[in-house]
Amino acid sequence: MSSAKDALQQVEHALNEVLLGKPEPVRLALACLLANGHLLIEDVPGVGKTTLAHALARAMNLEYQRVQFTSDLLPGDVLGVSIFEQASGQFRFHPGPIFTQVLLADEINRAPPKTQSALLEAMEERQASVEGATRELPVPFFVIATQNPEEQVGTHPLPESQLDRFLMRIQLGYPDAGAERALLERSGPAPAAAPVAESHPTPPRLVAPHQLREWQDRVAEVHAGAEVLDYLQGLISASRDRARFAHGLSPRAGLGLLRAARAYAFLEGRDYTTPDDIAHVLPAVAGHRVRAREPEAPERTVARLMECVPTP
């Protein structure tokens, strides 16, 4: 366990060198990957959402593809299409960008629902059905989607079925004064052909893909005792109280919450979970699933849920 903890600390350090002043979102993103889930990053443009996705894929040494979701994007642009080749007289399938290990679905809520739904099967079953054939996706398969706030022009709200495919939803927010000053001081003139801002250093490739798969298997074996399961069941039950909440946690959400807590414990170098692990990941896992009866910020809804079930 100590060797895994040391290696993951190196990854965290490298990511925090890229995304300054955001250690908790970085840790949650890494926990989401270890839990074999998918990550939704919701925030205004320009705070580092794409930077985090690219840096995480590189540090974990994973294949990476980026799709810019727009209003005219079609499902075939994501999944791939078959093209007739005159030389052979046959159709040949050309895989889309979804056939990768880390897929960045950038500004996912700018695409219409038909294109958003192209991801549903892939995110749940790790396979894609295209033109009557089902094709397995690479292992691991990790979707990082970014979305702009719904009040911005040209966005389409994600339906609940799509939101539920994301194990976690996080926000980065603006950097504090110290982190922003460091960001400004390390920026310099970028080459004319630079595809990204040169103020973000490129992290080294620190992990072999087989190591990540091994860690994901070990995360699933992290022990969850009776006290943890009692606390988790208490939160699930409280979220389904229709007098307080309009929508509660589903069984799939409860399993996801346990997986996320196990991954968080693994990052801490432990082979057992605690109720505090549940509490740490609860806002990211439950914030986009639990709905209050009256409109309010997701953070407030999760806080009220936690008030219903005190941490042991």
Image: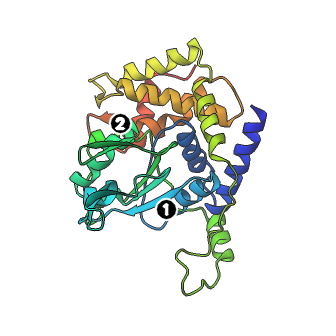
| Residue 26 in view | yes
Rendered-image quadrant of the N terminus: top right
Q: Residues within 10 Å of mark 1 (few under 14, many from 20)?
A: many
- Please tell me whether residue 266 is drawn above or below residue 75 in the rendered image: above
Front residue of 96 and 300:
96
Q: Nearer the viewer, residue 11 or 135?
A: 135
Q: Which residue is mark 2?
A: 289
Classify mark 2: helix, strand or loop.
loop
- Tally of numbered discs: 2
Q: Which callout, 1 or 2, points at the residue further toward the start of the chain?
A: 1
Q: Residue at x 65, y 32 (%)?
A: 266
Mark 2, residues whose alpha carbon is within 10 Å: few (<14), some, or many (≥20)? many
Colouring convention used in this rendered image of the protein: rainbow
- Does residue 167 sit above or below 192 in this rendering? above
The residue sitting at 55% across, 87% down in the picture is 192
* Disc 1, SS: helix
* Quarter of the picture holding the C terminus: top right
**What residue lies at 54% left-to-right and 74% top-to-bottom?**
196
Point out residue 165 in the picture as x, y percentages from the top left corner.
37, 39
Q: Position of residue 162 (x, y in %)?
A: 31, 43
User: Observer-nearest residue: 176 or 128?
Assistant: 128
> Mark 1 is on which residue type?
Thr
Give the percent coordinates (x, y) of residue 3: 77, 37
Task: Give me the residue at 62% from left, 19% from top.
Answer: 223
Q: Which residue is mark 1?
A: 50
Q: Quadrant of residue 221?
A: top right
The image shows residue 88 at horizontal and vertical percentages of: 30, 62
Q: Is residue 97 above or below residue 251?
A: below
Amino acid type shown at disc 2: Arg
